[in-house]
Image: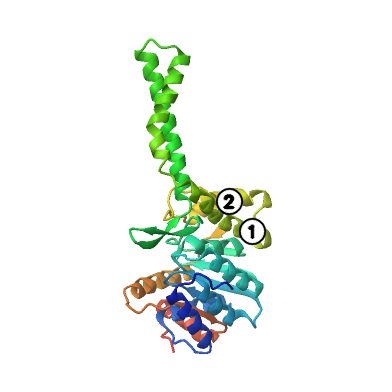
């Protein structure tokens, strides 16, 4: 694990994680709902509820849980708005090393780097509200004195738009000269090329060429991790791996772009909607997450629900529908 470049808060969280690994978590509303899902499906369930940026400390949290275990089947309930793509990759590899068949449930968000989790799952189950996001790597840039994450794809999209603008200018100029001036086609093309170059040159000069290589390498990280995961665990034809990955990395206009259940189907993933019972629990998790967001004391919830007493779990799941109160 590489600790170079980790900020102070993240380093404190890592040290705390290493020291406090044996503490048992109290049963929060989200944890109780995840227990319901585990009881309903009768499978061990790993919860990965990340409120802030996914980072290296979370690798340690997951490793403590799975390192001495092996699961034939494992459910993963994931909520994350993203973070470090390398951390997301390593966490998924850890989980896959210790599980044969991994089913991922996405109640609402698995955005940015968290989208990489779907590349290594045996089954993907998304609620009607669930959102994935493009895999364009985020890089830190200094803006107005502070550091902010920005998409490594931005300069490439800028160049694409400038190219389209230059072509439109050239096309309009040729048409105008041919219709209103006594120019031959060759003369109109020559003058229009010069005109388009003069107009767009100041814009192209604003592009920081020295950054293009850095951004290109950053995007290559997501591409290479994706290739590994699809090759090792994917059920998609290898001929389609790069088509899908390039769509996820380069194919959307914004980093916040929503990739929903239908889009995932269109891309080529084998994705399912939850059953009615599963959908009800996922909806309750979404409501609990919204309530949690209003709290000033949000805490990540990374836990393994290994075994739920069958009768108790079923009562918790079905209590409202059948008039049975949880014991």
**Which label number is shown at residue 93?**
none
Look at the image and tell me whether residue 248 can be seen.
no
Percent coordinates x, y for residue 304 in the rendering = 54, 81
Q: Is mark 1 on a helix, strand or loop?
A: helix
SS of the residue under disc 2: helix
Horizontal arrangement in the rendering, residue 121 relative to residue 257 (left or right): right
Q: Nearer the viewer, residue 52 or 173?
A: 173
Q: Which residue is drawn at 42% across and 71% down?
A: 52
- Specify the label residue 244 is tagged with: 2
CB under 8 Å between callouts 2 and 1? yes
**Relative vertical location of residue 53 with respect to residue 178 in this rendering, above or below:** below
Neighbourhood count class around disc 1 (C-alpha, 10 Å): few under 14, some 14–19, many 20 upward: many
- Which residue lies most toward the top here? 182
Looking at the rendered image, the quarter that the N terminus falls into is: bottom right
Q: Nearer the viewer, residue 326 or 96?
A: 96
Res. 230 mark: 1
Residue at horizontal 44 percent and vertical 87 percent from the top: 26
Left or right, 4 with reference to 255:
right
Q: Which of 38 and 296 is in front in this view?
A: 296
What colour scheme governs how the chains and residues are painted in the rendered image of this protein?
rainbow
Distance between mark 2 and mark 1 Cα atoms: 10 Å
Q: In which quarter of the image is the C terminus?
A: bottom left
Instruction: Give the left or right position of residue 147, taking residue 233 as reference.
Output: left
Q: Where is residue 33 in the image (x, y as percent from the top left)?
A: 45, 78
Sooner in the amino-acid sequence: mark 2 or mark 1: 1
Decide if residue 240 is in sight here: yes
Quarter-of-image position of residue 50: bottom left
In the rendered image, residue 311, in percent from the top left (x then y), is placed at 52, 86
Q: Which of 43 and 238 is in front in this view?
A: 238
């Amino acid at each position: 694990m590489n600790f170079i470049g980790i900020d102070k808060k993240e380093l404190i969280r890592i040290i705390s994680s290493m020291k406090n690994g044996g503490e048992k978590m109290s049963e929060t509303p989200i944890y109780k709902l995840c227990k319901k899902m585990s009881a309903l499906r009768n499978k061990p369930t790993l919860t990965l509820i990340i409120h802030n940026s996914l980072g290296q400390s979370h690798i340690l949290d997951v490793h403590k849980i799975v390192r001495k275990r092996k699961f034939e089947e494992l459910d993963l309930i994931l909520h994350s708005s993203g973070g470090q793509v390398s951390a997301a990759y390593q966490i998924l590899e850890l989980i896959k090393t210790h599980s044969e068949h991994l089913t991922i449930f996405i109640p609402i968000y698995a955005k940015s780097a968290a989208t990489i989790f779907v590349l290594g799952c045996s089954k993907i189950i998304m609620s009607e509200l669930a959102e994935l996001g493009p895999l364009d790597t985020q890089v830190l840039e200094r803006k107005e004195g502070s550091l902010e994450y920005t998409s490594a794809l931005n300069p490439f999209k800028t160049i694409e738009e400038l190219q389209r603008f230059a072509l439109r200018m050239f096309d309009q100029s040729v048409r105008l000269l041919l219709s209103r001036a006594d120019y031959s086609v060759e003369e109109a093309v020559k003058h229009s090329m010069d005109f388009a170059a003069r107009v767009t040159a100041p814009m192209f000069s604003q592009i920081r060429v020295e950054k293009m290589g850095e951004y290109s390498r950053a995007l290559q990280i997501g591409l290479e991790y994706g290739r590994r995961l699809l090759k090792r665990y994917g059920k998609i034809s290898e001929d389609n791996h790069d088509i899908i990955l390039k769509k996820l990395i380069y194919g959307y206009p914004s980093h916040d772009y929503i990739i929903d259940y239908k889009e995932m189907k269109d891309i080529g993933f084998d994705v399912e909607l939850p059953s009615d019972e599963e959908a009800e629990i996922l909806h309750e998790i979404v409501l609990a997450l919204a309530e949690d967001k209003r709290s000033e004391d949000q805490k990540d919830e990374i836990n393994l629900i290994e075994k739920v007493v069958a009768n108790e779990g079923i009562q918790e799941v079905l209590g409202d529908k059948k008039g049975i109160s949880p014991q």
